[in-house]
Amino acid sequence: MKALILAWLLVGFTGFMTLAQSPKSINPPLPGFDLAGSDARAVQIADEVMAAMGGRPAWDDTQLIAWNFNGLRKFVWDKYSGNVRIDNVLDDQTILLNINSDKGRVYRNGEELTEPDSVMKYVRQGKRNWLNDSYWLLMPFKLKDAGATLKYLGTETTQAGKAADILQITYKTNNLAPGVRHKIWIDKKTRLVSQWAQFGKLTDKQPLFVVPWDDYQQHGDILLASERGSHDLSDIMVFTGLPGEVFSDFTRTDLSRYHEAK
């Protein structure tokens, strides 16, 4: 489904009042955020979303996140080191990579691949999957990422009939699909993301998809939502620690054996 080939983008935010977006801000933008091109109201709402999700310190302190994307791929991501484990649910393939170095190892069809071009092919595939699938889980924390521009589009109701403020996000840098834009509904009462749409081009009038963003649960010190219509997420877990072999051993492990963050 082409709608799934969305872009994740790596970080940012800019602004209206220099003081409000100083390094001492409670939710400072990541370097490269387009503050000058963003609306002050949109930036304010992005900060409200971060607070509703648990707050920036809680997000920064969250290190290890696991999830299952649409029953297709299982991920474990170490935010601090950049290590990612990807187990493909439907076949015998595991990719162990580092998203910062773009290096990794690949196990496929009963053996570890050693041919450099094949390894590179699947490591790159794994990173594309991580970029896409992590955005489906973590987008509310990424509103002030590098390369992002935020616009406030006013108010609207969701498909579920809830009143919401509308944000638009576009990116100057986009690792998967240049030119896409995102429309995000922020619930008027909870200040949580409640619906999300992606458009294939900046000028497109009709979205590739519109999905709910619902079923929030506490994981450690942050909230994460699992419901995305026909593309739900599952097995969401946050850990304070995991054994090193999770990121080095191809043997698939049952993460439920380990203590989740409280």
Image (cartoon, rainbow, N blue to C red):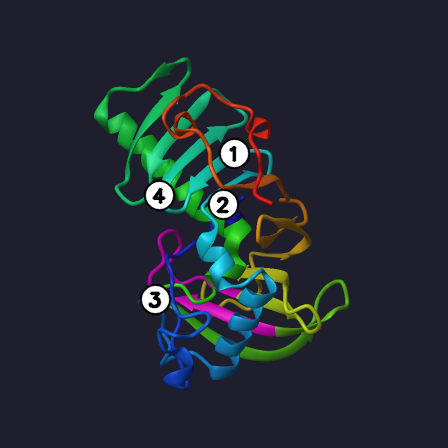
Q: In the image, which is nearer the foreground, mark 3 or mark 1?
A: 1
Residue 51 makes an appearance in the image? yes
CA separation in Å, label 4 and label 1: 18 Å
Q: How many other residues sit within 10 Å of disc 2, few (<14), some (14-19) or many (≥20)?
A: many
For residue 199, say whether it is visible. no
First of labels 1, 2 by sequence position: 1
Q: Which residue is mark 4?
A: 82
Q: Are marks 3 and 1 in contact (CB under 8 Å)?
A: no
Q: Amino acid at mark 4?
A: Gly
Give the Cα distance between marks 4 and 3: 23 Å
Mark 1 belongs to which amino acid?
Arg
Query: Where on the picture, by quarter, is residue 185?
Result: bottom right
Count numbered badges in the picture.
4
Mark 4 nearby-residue class (10 Å; few <14, some 14–19, many ≥20): some
Q: Residue at x 36, y 81 (%)?
A: 36
Q: Is residue 221 magenta?
A: no
Image height of 214 relative to 18, above or below = above
Kindly identify which residue carries mark 2: 133
Mark 1–mark 2 contact, CB under 8 Å? yes
- The secondary element bearing badge 3 is classed as loop
Q: In the figure, 117 relative to 4: above or below?
A: above
Q: Which residue is mark 1?
A: 73
Q: Residue furthest right?
A: 161
Q: Position of residue 254 (x, y in %)?
A: 56, 24
- At a point 68% along the width and 49% down the height, the residue shown is 229
